Image: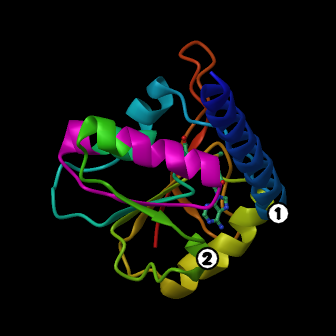
């Protein structure tokens, strides 16, 4: 009984520590973890062609939900970068439960080379997108498609804007092509 109590205490402390760490990382990054809704993911994926050798990156992939849907619906094995520890662990757990092949990296996407990307997905805040816009302009090859959920990317000209649809509860989507 005492041993069970000790195990539960350790589990609770470890979870609280991870939660605190996650909150601190989110504060440091300036982007909270807000998962995309399924209907938004479906709308986003409409812009992704069904070609299984495409290089797709989800910058700040959260629980990996977009990547799992991408794999299921289009057969594409995308790569996601995430830095919030608890959220990343949840994504790993999901990957394992789903027997998924998506690639999840515990890494800062600003430190990754995105030059081979065919498609980049992001749901980030305006301040971060300003910095990201410069990286994408300098690094991405011609023809790279970028899909931004809700916020525009300063410095890039959208190829298409899918306006917010209140009735369908869909946010604005900004589509860019380098
Ligand atoms: C608004 S959430 C979106 C999650 C997911 N893409 C979705 O749409 O469901 C943004 C995520 O980006 C992550 N993030 C922000 N800056 C990051 C960075 N520089 N490197 C890796 N992850 C980052 C945050 O931890 C957060 O989980």
| Residue 53 shows in the view | yes
Q: Nearer the viewer, mark 2 or mark 1?
A: 1
Question: Which residue corresponds to mark 1?
Answer: 28
Q: Look at the image and tell me whether residue 45 can be seen.
A: no
Question: Of marks 2 and 1, which one's residue comes earlier in the chain?
Answer: 1
Question: Up-down: is 161 above or below 153?
Answer: above
The residue at which mark 2 appears reads as 110
Q: Where residue 27 appears, x then y in whole percent?
A: 84, 56
Q: Residue at x 71, y 35 (%)?
A: 12
User: What range is drawn magenta here?
Assistant: 71-94
Q: Left of 97 or right of it: where is 148?
A: right
| Location of the N terminus (image quadrant) | top right
Is residue 73 found left or right of 120 in the rendered image?
Answer: left
The extreme top residue here reads 167
Q: Residue at x 80, y 48 (%)?
A: 20
Residue at the spot 46% in from the left edge and 45% down from the top edge: 91
Q: Quadrant of residue 29?
A: bottom right
Left/right placement of residue 139 relative to residue 132 reads left
Disc 2 C-beta below 8 A from ligand 1 = yes
Asked whether the beta carbons under mark 2 and mark 1 sit within 8 Å of each other, the answer is no
Query: In whole angstroms, how far apart are the C-alphas of marks 2 and 1?
Result: 14 Å
- Mark 1, ligand 1, within 8 Å: the answer is no
User: Would you identify the image quadrant in which residue 95 lies?
Assistant: top left
Q: Residue furthest bottom?
A: 138
**Is 148 included in the stretch rendered in magenta?**
no
x and y percent of residue 53 in the render? 17, 64
Badge 2: residue crowd in 10 Å (few <14, some 14–19, many ≥20): few
């Amino acid at each position: 009984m005492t041993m069970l109590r000790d195990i539960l205490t350790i589990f609770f402390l470890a979870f609280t520590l991870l939660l605190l760490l996650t909150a601190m990382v989110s504060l440091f990054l300036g982007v909270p973890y807000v998962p995309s809704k399924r209907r938004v993911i479906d709308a986003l994926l409409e812009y992704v062609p069904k070609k299984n050798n495409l290089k797709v990156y989800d910058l700040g992939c959260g629980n990996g939900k977009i990547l799992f849907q991408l794999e299921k619906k289009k057969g594409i094995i995308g790569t996601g970068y995430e830095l919030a520890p608890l959220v990343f662990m949840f994504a790993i757990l999901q990957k394992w439960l789903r027997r998924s092949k998506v690639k999840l990296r515990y890494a800062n996407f600003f430190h990754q080379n995105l030059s081979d990307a065919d498609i980049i997905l992001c749901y980030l805040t305006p301040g971060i997108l300003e910095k990201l816009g410069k990286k994408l302009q300098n690094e991405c090859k011609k023809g790279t498609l970028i899909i931004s959920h809700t916020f525009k990317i300063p410095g890039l000209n959208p190829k298409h804007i899918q306006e917010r649809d209140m009735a369908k509860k869909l946010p604005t989507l900004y589509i860019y092509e380098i």
